[in-house]
């Protein structure tokens, strides 16, 4: 009689425990969520990126990468923004008011940027532009063409220029300042961005972002792809990056670009996501190299 009662009890308990396991499994799957970056979660996203980027750098190279940006001048009279990154002066923004009475103000601002770079003992300067005339004018100031990124709509090309020595070359007397009357952002990463978060139990474990600035020209640039250390090697980086690329493709983009240092993830982008290396930039401190990559969508 006792055996019959025990068997009956097990039959009652088993289905219940089985349902609980299935429910828990389903619940754990729902806890892993992919969602867009919004105004509401933007601060949490920024904190996650900064904290985990620092941890990654300490893990890989034993130091934290802290690029320093400086604004020379002001909004009223014109200014130039320079980013100091491991010995490189990255000229990111040049603003020349339309009503400026100062001749060749853009050139004067570049001179100030190079002076700042020399005072900080930086090794070289770089700048990017979609304007062919600006590229030619910068060559006359000692910048050399590193690479020309093609494939944009409207027959646009992105010129990458580098100055290997931090000095200023005086322009010719008939030199025409191509920056006059322009509010120009030279950085590929300036402007609006979009991105996605991967959360587990409402905790952010991964982020990937893309630029919107060049979407009208048929391209985006991927950046800030970060996965928390304990969640790496699970395919989350690939999932996040592909989500960014799919979103860009739906917006009409035909290719994507990115740049990554050698100690970061060039092999990951190349082998796991199909990006190819367009060119590499050397000259950074401690022999580091920056790889510029692209992929057709």
Image (spheres, grey):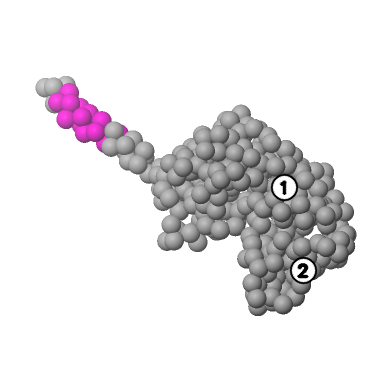
Q: Within the magenta stretch, is there residue 19?
A: yes
Secondary structure under badge 1?
Answer: strand
Residue 239 lies in the magenta stretch = no
Vertical arrangement, residue 32 with respect to residue 191, above or below? above
Number of residues whose C-alpha sits closer than 10 Å to that of mark 2, classed few (under 14), some (14–19) or many (20 or more) = some
Residue at 64%, 62% (x, y): give it: 184
**Horizontal and vertical percent for residue 125?**
79, 55
Residue of label 2:
104
Is 106 or 265 nearer to us in this picture? 106
Looking at the image, which is closer to me, 73 or 240? 73
The earlier-in-sequence mark between 2 and 1 is: 2
Which is more toward the observer, 244 or 34? 244
Which region is colored magenta?
6-21
Image x and y of residue 57, in percent: 68, 48
Q: Which mark is residue 248?
A: none
Q: Residue beneath label 1, please?
A: 160
Magenta segment's dominant SS is: helix
Q: Quadrant of the N terminus?
A: top left
> Quadrant of the rendered structure where residue 29 is?
top left
The residue at the point 62 percent across, 52 percent down is: 188
Give how far apart the Cα atoms at labels 2 and 1 are.
22 Å
> x and y percent of residue 273 in the render?
56, 32
The image shows a total of numbered marks equal to 2
In the depicted structure, whether residue 174 falls above or below residue 273: below
Q: Nearer the viewer, residue 41 or 92?
A: 92
The percent coordinates of residue 166 (x first, y second) are 86, 58
């Amino acid at each position: 009689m006792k055996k019959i009662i025990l068997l009956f009890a097990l039959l009652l308990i088993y289905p219940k425990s089985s349902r609980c396991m299935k429910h828990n499994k389903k619940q754990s799957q729902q806890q892993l969520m992919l969602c867009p970056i919004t105004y509401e979660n933007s601060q949490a996203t920024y904190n996650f990126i900064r904290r985990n980027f620092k941890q990654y750098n300490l893990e890989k190279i034993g130091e934290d990468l802290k690029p320093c940006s400086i604004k020379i001048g002001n909004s009223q009279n014109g200014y130039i923004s320079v980013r100091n990154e491991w010995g490189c002066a990255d000229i990111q923004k040049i603003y020349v008011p339309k009503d400026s009475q100062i001749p060749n103000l853009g050139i004067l601002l570049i001179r100030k940027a190079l002076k700042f770079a020399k005072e900080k003992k930086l090794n070289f300067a770089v700048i990017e532009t979609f304007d062919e005339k600006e590229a030619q004018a910068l060559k006359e100031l000692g910048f050399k063409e590193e690479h020309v990124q093609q494939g944009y709509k409207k027959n646009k090309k992105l010129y990458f220029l580098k100055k290997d020595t931090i000095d200023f070359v005086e322009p010719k007397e008939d030199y025409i300042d191509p920056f006059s009357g322009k509010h120009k952002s030279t950085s590929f990463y300036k402007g609006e961005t979009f991105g996605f978060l991967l959360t587990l139990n409402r905790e952010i474990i991964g982020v990937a972002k893309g630029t919107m600035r060049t979407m009208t020209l048929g391209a985006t640039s991927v950046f800030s792809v970060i996965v928390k250390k304990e969640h790496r090697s699970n395919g989350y980086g690939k999932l996040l990056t592909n989500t960014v690329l799919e979103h860009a493709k739906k917006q009409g983009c035909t290719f994507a670009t990115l740049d990554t240092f050698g100690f970061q993830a060039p092999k990951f982008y190349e082998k796991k996501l199909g990006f190819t290396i367009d060119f590499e930039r050397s000259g950074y401190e401690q022999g580091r190299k920056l790889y510029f990559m692209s992929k057709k969508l």
